[in-house]
Each structure stands twice: as structure tokens, then as C-alpha cells.
Image (tube, rainbow, N blue to C red):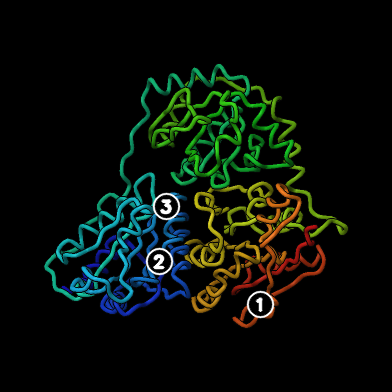
Amino acid sequence: MQASDLLVSCLEAEGVEYVFGLPGEELEDLLFSIRDSEVQFIPVRHEQGAAFMADVHGRLTGEAGVCLSTLGPGATNLLTGVADAHLDKSPLVAITGQGGRERLHQESHQMLDVVDMFEPITKWNTRMDYPDAIHESVRKAFKLAEHEKPGATHLEIPEDVAGEETDSRPLDPGEREIRRPSPDGEAIDRAVEVLREADRPLVLAGNGAVRTRAAEQLRSLVEMTDIPAVATYMGKGAVSDADDHSLMTLDSGSEDQAERVIDRADTILAVGYDIAEHDPENWNPDGEKRVVHLDFEPAEVYEHYVPDVEVVCDIAHGIEALCGADIGGTDTDWYADLREDLVEEVTGAPTEDDDVTVKNALPLLREAMADEDVLISDVGSHKMAIAKHFPTYDPNTCIISNGLATMGIAVPGAVAADIAVEEDVVAVTGDGGFLMNAAELETATRLDCSFTVVVFRDDDYGLISEKQRDHRDEAFGTGLGNPDFVTFAESFGIDAHRPETWDELGEVLDDAVGGDGVTLVEVPLEPVR
């Protein structure tokens, strides 16, 4: 068969249903091979959007999302989304076209060393120079992308290679679930000893607790031991925030409450925690807390994160081993009042006289969404509010980029989420992040997607302004101008609203979430002074 046909047959063998990308001259053979396959090519409006879609698809399904671009500027546009997947531990396979091999040794049109460029942001990447090796390269890319800890891989195919003939055939992926190591008995014994000695133990649930589908085991552990849990931004939902053991996230509540939660704890059981999510210096500044590290890989070396014991194994199996040991019960008095304060703070609906802020709007959004619905958060000041004040009840229902923390992910992420899950989807974004990839609204309408976009407008890069004011009592270089978002959305043929009261906002959200088609809701915020 033709090499491009082999590549697409390999994608079919891996179970790929969608490829998100942009066409290019160097991709001609590959695109027509996709056309004649069971894989659906989804043309998007910007390569960054394609990578974000593959990123969110990978996070929600655990199976590598696939994005495609041409050489040169197409590949450079793909970089940010691929890097986001890599730092957020989301399985993704990026494919880029390249010029013919006869011109790769010299300066030529749109020619960049793309493989070298992708090296720092992928687990593995290669140029497929030989048609007979394509089947092995594709299998390796998917295996490494999906293997714990997952991340991004990259394949480049020169246009002349794509048109050559090959006798190779796709490899059978076989058992996709690679067996992971069971916990070492001695390490479990030491972890149990540390937890028994603790007066105020606290579970810190990270991205890995959600990513490895270990939530069921973690919930059993906190129920058996009464040890409370906080989550990182990417660990939200590992323990339901409806559970009395949940103390929301590390930053939940007002500043003094957040400090009291983590300050009171003397021992941390860190489950699937990556320090890229949340700097340990913020919760262990003096290095005085005892730490049990439970993860698939050893802990990063960092002076504020020096575990007393490391349990390196499959996370779910490690938690099961702790559940089977006699850790004993924990006195709930040390955190019960914190739980009560946090619940009151995150569930109270706004009153008529309350300022229009993201925090005040979130209870109305939470009320409009079912527990299993999926929220995709963009990055900005609204992300901080969502992380702290949006109760999350199931794993993978509040998607936050917090490894690379990339603006512009919400709208393309919602496209991918709508395709990947049956539940309702809501994209929450600020005006800055929204306009970075707002063109993907056209992709959404073309695909007949149904989701809600909530745009908080403050005409500013608000998070940066906030930090500048904290440091200097003034802000510079952060002000924005915006179009009329309602008219802008309607130009795509979608419904749009700008509610003027809290009651109107609640009604609009109730109607939009679960409705047909894409709906945009603009929420103008009170100006920051």
C-alpha cells in the first residue's frame, strides 16, 4: 500500500476516530488517505485549536488525541497545545508534514527542524523517513503517549515518503492497558506507620488521582479513615466536594481559611501529585510537614517536597493496600469547622446587591449543571475562582490547564469535550482567552456541537492586573478593547445573551446548559479599581 495509507491504517488500528488539524500542501497524500478511511478529519481554524482539542480529548478519554499540521508555521502553531498536553500529562499524538527529503539538507521554503523543535515538549518524537518503519513508529508514539505518566509524542512525515509504496502492515496494539507495578510491602508498612503517627493527616489529591482512575479507591480510603482531602486544581473531583471529608482545593476559601486548612495538617498523603501543578513551597514553606508520596514515579527533587516515604506503584493499587492496612481513624474535629465554612462560601447564591464577580456567579452555574456535566476552564483570574469556588463531584468534570496553564484552551476544548462525552459541556473563559481561539466557534457550528460558552468580560488581562496591583498598587499594559460579544456570537449563527441581573443570569444558564446548539453568555464584570 501507499505509505500514507499505511499511516492511516495504523491510526485505525489504534482506535483513532478523529484527527483535528489544518490541511497543507505537504499533507495531500495523507489527507486523501484519511478521506478513504474510517477516521474523521476535522478541519479547524488554527493549529493551536487542533492541539487543544486533541489535548482535552486525551484527558477525558485516556486515549491519545491526534492533531495534524503541515510544516513550518503549521508546526510552530501546534507547539503550544502540544506543550500543554505534555505538562498536563494528557495523551496526545501530533503529526506534522514536511517537505521532500531532497531539500531537507539545505535552507528552503518553510523548512524548520521540526523534530528538534518538538524534542523538549514530547516524550518521544521522530521523522518517519522510511515507509517500512511507519507501523512501528505509530505504535511506539501511541504506546508512549498513553503509558503512565502520559504525555505528548510527535511524528513527522516528509511528503515524498507519504507517496512511496510499502509492504508493511499495521501492528496490533494488543492489550492497551499496560500492567503497572504493585506497591512494595515495606514501603506500605512505612507509609502506614507515618499516617498512624499523624495527629492531623491530610490527603492531597493531584492530577494522577484523576488521570489513573483511582478516585473510587481514594474515596474508600477517606471514608474508612476520616482523613480529609484537598485537591490540586487538576485533582478536583477525585474526592467529591459533596463528601464531608472534602476541603475543596488547596486554595479554596478566603485567604485565611486556605492557610488554616494546610497549616493545621501535620502530615500529607500526596496521591498522584505533580509539583508542576502547585508549588510545594506554597503549602510546605518550612519543610516541616511529613509527606507520604504515592505515585507511579518517584518524587521530584525539591527542598520543599522531601517525602518521608515514597510508595512508587500503580496509584489505585497503592491506595487499596493502604485501605487493607490498619491505619486507624482520624479525629474529625480538627477540620470539621473548615469544611462547614467552605461549603457555606461556595454554595451561597448571590443577592441582588452583590457585585458581579466570577465567584458570585459560580453558584448559579453550578446549579444549572448536573454533577456529571463537564466544565472546561480557560486560564486567567476566572480560573482561580473556579479552582477555589466551583464544587466538583466527579473526576474529569472540571478540566483546568495548570501544568502549562495556557490561555485559549476553553472553546476548542469544549469542541473536543462535546465530541468525547455525552454529558453537557460548559466552556468558561475570560475575554482575553476567548478571543485567542474564538474562531473555533465556526468549527463548533459546522460540527453541530451543543455546549455553552460563558465569557466573563472585564476588558483587561485581569489576573495580571491583580498581581501588578498587589506588587505596585497600579497596573500597566493589561487593558483591552472588545467587540460586542453578543453580536460577535450571533454572526456565527449561535444564540447569545447578556443578562443584566442575577435572576436573568440564572435563568439564561438554566436554559443554555443542556440546550441545543452553541450558546454564548456574556457576563460583564464590575470594573476593578
Nearest the camera: 249 or 63?
A: 249
**SS under mark 1:** strand
Question: In what quadrant of the picture does the C terminus appear?
Answer: bottom right
- Tell me residue 174's x, y (percent): 25, 52
Q: Residue extending furthest right?
A: 353
Nearest the camera: 45 or 186?
A: 45
Residue 419 visible in the displayed image = yes
Q: Which residue is mark 1?
A: 495
Lateral position of residue 499 relative to residue 274, left or right = right
Q: Nearer the viewer, mark 1 or mark 2?
A: 2
Q: Quadrant of residue 474?
A: bottom right
Q: Which residue is mark 2?
A: 76
Q: Nearer the viewer, mark 3 or mark 1?
A: 3
- Tell me residue 212's x, y (percent): 43, 44
Lateral position of residue 17 relative to residue 227, left or right = left
Query: Which of the two labelled residues, at mark 2 and mark 3, occupies the earlier sequence position?
Result: 2
Residue at x 65% of width, y 71% of height: 520
Residue 86 is tagged as 3
Question: In what quadrant of the picture does the N terminus appear?
Answer: bottom left
Q: Nearer the viewer, mark 2 or mark 3?
A: 2
Q: Amino acid at mark 3?
A: His
